[in-house]
Image (cartoon, rainbow, N blue to C red):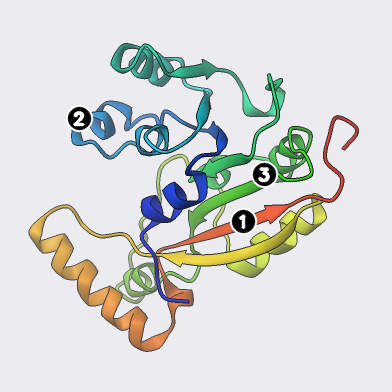
Amino acid sequence: MALCERVSFLKDLCRGRRVLHLGCADWPYTKERLASGRLLHSAIESVAKSQIGVDLSQEGVELLRKFAPAWDVRCVDANSFVPDFEYDIILCSELIEHMENPGLLLRSIRKWAHCNSQLVLTTPNAYALKASLRALAGREFCHPDHTVVFSSKTLQQLLKKCGWDTTQTAYYHLSGHSTISRMLSGTVWLLNFICSDRMGDGLIVVARTDNPGPEA
C-alpha cells in the first residue's frame, strides 16, 4: 500500500469508537504539541465516541487537564492500569519503543481487550530511508528515551509471542514543519514511492487477540 499520513490513518480507525490511548501526553513535548495543535490525543478526541488517556508523566497529564478539563486523562503506569470498561481501540502510538520490556506491555494490554478489540501500534521503522541516509553520512538520530527499534517483521513476531495476531500493516511518512524540512521530506517521500513503502518513516500495525480478558 502507499505511504500514509499517521494521524489521518489513526483518526479513521478511531472514528466513533471507544478508545484507550496509552502515552496520551507525549511528554516531554506536551506543551509544544498543544501549542501547535499537533497533539495526537486532541485529534482522536475530535472523532472518538469516547476516549480515556493514560500516561506515566504527571507533568504531561496536568498540562492536558489544564488545557481541556473535560478530558479523561490519568497518570498511571500502563502495565498496572485497571480498565473501567471494554475498549474498541487500544491505541499505543509511538510508545513501545520507549519501553524497557515491550513484551510485558503487550501482555498487559491483552488483559484489557475483548473479542472485538483492536490494538493499534505505531512506532519508528528500523528500515526507514531517512535513518539509512543518516547512517551513510555517519550519523544517527535517536530520541533520548528510545530503547528499541522495530521492523514490521520483528514487531509482528513479538506480537505473536504475546498472544496477538496482526491483521493490518501500513507505513507512514512524516512531513517536516519548516520549509526546508518539508522539501527534504518531500524528496525522501519520492524516493520511498520509487523504491518501497517499506522504507517509510514508521510502522502502523493493527492486531487482535483470540484469548482476551483477565485470564490472559
Going by the numbered disc 3, the residue's amino acid type is Pro
The quadrant in which residue 109 appears is top right
Q: Residue at x 48, y 46 (%)?
A: 94
Vertical order, 108 against 136 (above or below)? above
Whichever of callouts 3 and 1 sits on the residue coming sooner in the sequence is: 3
Circle 3: element type: helix
According to the picture, the residue beneath numbered tag 2 turns out to be 35
Measuring from the top left, give residue 56's x and y in whole percent. 53, 23
Name the amino acid type tagged 1: Val
How dense is the environment of label 2, judged by Cα within 10 Å: few (below 14), some, or many (20 and up)? few
Kindly identify which numbered label has been placed on residue 102.
3
The percent coordinates of residue 136 (x first, y second) are 34, 77
Badge 2 amino acid: Ala
Return the residue nearer the eye: 118 or 92: 118
Q: Which mark is residue 206?
A: 1
Left/right placement of residue 73 relative to residue 3 reads: right
Q: Are marks 3 and 1 in contact (CB under 8 Å)?
A: no
| Mark 2–mark 1 CB contact (< 8 Å) | no
How many C-alpha atoms fall within 10 Å of the one at disc 1: few (<14), some, or many (≥20)?
many
Disc 2 element? helix
Residue drawn where x is 65% and y is 34% of the image: 87
Q: Nearer the viewer, residue 191 or 40?
A: 40
Q: Answer left or right for 39 relative to 178.
A: right
Task: Name the spot of residue 63 as percent of width and height, x first.
Answer: 33, 17
Q: Is residue 30 above or below residue 129?
A: above
Task: Compare marks 2 and 3 and give the one earlier in the sequence.
Answer: 2
Q: Residue 92, image x and y in percent?
A: 56, 42
